[in-house]
Amino acid sequence: MPKGYWIGHVTIDDVETYKLYQQANAAPFKEFGAKFLVRGGAQTVREGEMRGRSVVLEFPTIEAAYACYDSAVYQAAKAIRESVSAGDIAIVEGV
């Protein structure tokens, strides 16, 4: 069964409130076995355009990646994120 990945690119407008999102997403990420591979950090855009922050999470299965995103607990956390940031998120199946 392939792993699942969330790939996100985010522009944060309010860093302090975004920290509340990070606290709120910890429980669903733990429940669904997420592991951060990239969480912010320096980035150099070589082609195209990207937002200022990149995040990559690995899940044990693609099903877990979808289930986490769709869970009520993550959706509550997402509401916090959406109030203080703009982002692009894709759920991708691993090889």
Image (cartoon, rainbow, N blue to C red):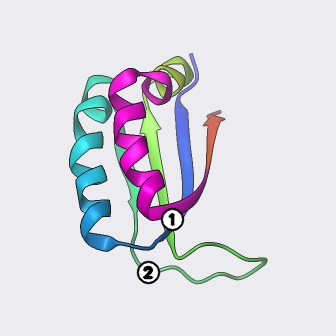
Determine which residue is flagged by label 1. 54
Residue lying farthest to the front in this orientation: 83
Q: Position of residue 77 (x, y in %)?
A: 34, 41
Instruction: Say which element carries label 1.
Output: strand
Residue at left 31%, top 34%? 29
Q: Position of residue 54 (x, y in %)?
A: 51, 65
Residue at left 22%, top 33%? 27
Badge count: 2
Q: Is residue 87 above or below residue 30?
A: below
Residue lying farthest to the right in this orientation: 48
> Where residue 76 is drawn, which disc sits there?
none
Q: Is residue 40 above or below residue 58?
A: below
Instruction: Say which element carries label 2.
Output: loop
Q: Point out the tag, 2 or 1, that comes first from the N-terminus.
A: 2
Residue at left 44%, top 31%? 59
Residue at left 36%, top 49%? 80
Q: Is residue 19 above or below residue 1?
A: below
Q: Position of residue 48 (x, y in %)?
A: 78, 77
Neighbours of disc 1 within 10 Å: few (<14), some (14-19), many (20+): many
Q: Amino acid at mark 1?
A: Ser
Q: For the N terminus, which image quadrant? A: top right
Which stretch is magenta? 68-88
Q: Amino acid at mark 2?
A: Ala
Q: CA distance from mark 2 to mark 1?
A: 9 Å
Assess whether mark 1 and mark 2 are in contact (beta carbons under 8 angstroms). no
Q: Which quadrant of the view contains residue 78?
A: top left
Q: Which quadrant of the view contains residue 12?
A: bottom left
Q: Is residue 82 left or right of residue 16?
A: right
Q: Is residue 31 left or right of residue 46?
A: left
> Where residue 42 is drawn, which disc sits there?
2
Q: Position of residue 44 (x, y in %)?
A: 58, 84
